[in-house]
Image (cartoon, rainbow, N blue to C red):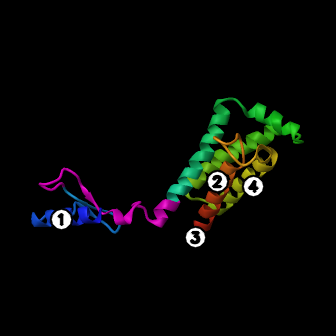
Amino acid sequence: MENYIRENKERCSQYHHKPVRESPYLQVYPPSLFSDNFVINMKRLPFLSLTQALVLLRASLALIFLLHAIVRIANGTIERFGGFLNTKGFIYGSVVVWGITVYEIAGGLLLALGYFTRWLSAGFIVLLITGIILIHASLGWFVGEHGTGGVEYSFILIIALLVTAAADRR
């Protein structure tokens, strides 16, 4: 690959081509007379700075929580989830579920915008740990191929929230 890039760079320079776009992360040269492909400097993949990657992570987490709450409302499963919480000892399960849903919507929007990142992350982590204790721990570790409803998804969300909170410099 290195030779291919070097050769195409040399060919482009023979015809006085300069990079169409050049940054520390990406250099794209126009197609040469010998190739229909763009030449891309692969050394700097994935084209994102650490700051951009952290913003992408924060926005993705926000989207996950927002969609989780919206689907709960759209599918009308709040009462069913509330009934489940009642069987676990909660007195007002439906009220708790509405509180969780409002938190996921408002917190998701604020997290996406970068406000109160540490506090929101802490709140989401508390929700996830509670979910692990009440639901997921009894179902094992895996979600998907090796099990159903286990802890692994909540675990990785907690780690992602910890990274997002640690990256908040405010």
Q: Quarter-wise, where is residue 166 in the image?
A: bottom right
| Residue found at x 74% / y 34% | 78
As drawn, the label of residue 126 is 4
Residue at image position (18%, 54%) is 31
User: What residue is disc 1 on?
Assistant: 18
Residue range corresponding to the magenta coloring: 31-54
Q: What residue type is labelled 1?
A: Lys
- Mark 1 in CB contact with mark 4 (< 8 angstroms): no
Which of the labelled discs sits on residue 107, or is there none?
none
Secondary element type, mark 3: loop
Crowd around label 2: few <14 · some 14–19 · many ≥20 (10 Å): some
Q: Is the residue under label 3 in contact with that under label 4 (CB below 8 Å)?
A: no
Residue 96 in the image: x percent, y percent?
79, 42
Give me the C-alpha separation between circle 3 and circle 2: 20 Å
Does residue 48 belong to the magenta stretch?
A: yes
**Residue type pointed to by label 2:** Leu
Mark sitting earlier along the chain (1/3): 1
State the separation of the CA atoms marked 2 and 4. 12 Å
User: As displayed, is residue 66 above or below residue 2?
Assistant: above
Is 40 or 115 nearer to us in this picture?
A: 40
Which residue is at the front of the view, 135 or 53?
A: 135
- Mark 1 → mark 2, Cα distance in angstroms: 43 Å
